Image: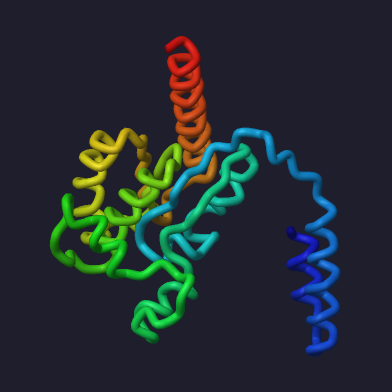
Amino acid sequence: YRKALALIDDACTWEGLNCAVEKAGDALREIVVDNKRAVLKIGLVGEIYTLLEPFSNQNLERSLGTLGVETDRSVYLSEWVNNHLFGGLLKGERRKNEVCAAAHPYLRHFVGGHGQETIGSAVLYAKAGYNGLIQLFPFTCMPEIVAESVLPDVSCDLNIPSLTLIMDEHSGEAGIQTRLEAFVDLLEQKRETALREQSAG
């Protein structure tokens, strides 16, 4: 992945970019994938900038990937553009109204920022069979604080564990890594327990 990014970064022309994309694709296709391996899936929810910017979230997705976890963000820049600039016209992207409808049993009103989307996305991830949720937001973000207070109800009702990480200039990589490792261990134990109960029953 990093090599692919480096190839793309080094490209100076359209031809060079096309060549870099082709080489990157070839390299990615050479990676051996074990499709039978059971991988934990975690939905990432929260404030848009903290979700999208690796520096602000201490490279959370990379850290989780290193732990063998598959992640999906509730917000992608393309979706935000589609929902806010194109009114949801582009098909294939998650639509804001669907997410807000999913939030309705827990949070019926817009609370600013992405609070309502956080709850709606959490509900959708739970219904899609994800193993856990991680909520990310910057310190003192009021809409996400509102969502944080509602998230335990979603977790309890839909049986999906959640972890909230509040990021600020004092957030240390080691502390976050420790919390991620503990959360992933919890999710693995929960999955193993469910499998044992299923095979016994």
Q: Residue at x 52, y 33 (%)?
A: 181
Residue ranking furthest to the left: 109
Of the pair 169 and 147, the residue shown nearer to us: 147
At which x and y percent is residue 186?
A: 45, 26
Write down the quadrant of residue 116 in the picture.
Answer: bottom left
Q: Residue at x 78, y 68 (%)?
A: 6
The correct choice, above or below, for 191 with respect to 161 in the image is above
At which x and y percent is residue 46?
A: 36, 57
Of the pair 19 and 37, the residue shown nearer to us: 37
Write down the quadrant of residue 54 in the picture.
Answer: bottom right
Residue ranking furthest to the top: 200
Of the pair 134 and 170, the residue shown nearer to us: 134
Q: Is residue 29 left or right of residue 101?
A: right
The correct choice, above or below, for 123 with respect to 111 in the image is above
Of the pair 186 and 125, the residue shown nearer to us: 125
Q: Is residue 138 left or right of residue 28?
A: left
At which x and y percent is residue 123?
A: 31, 49
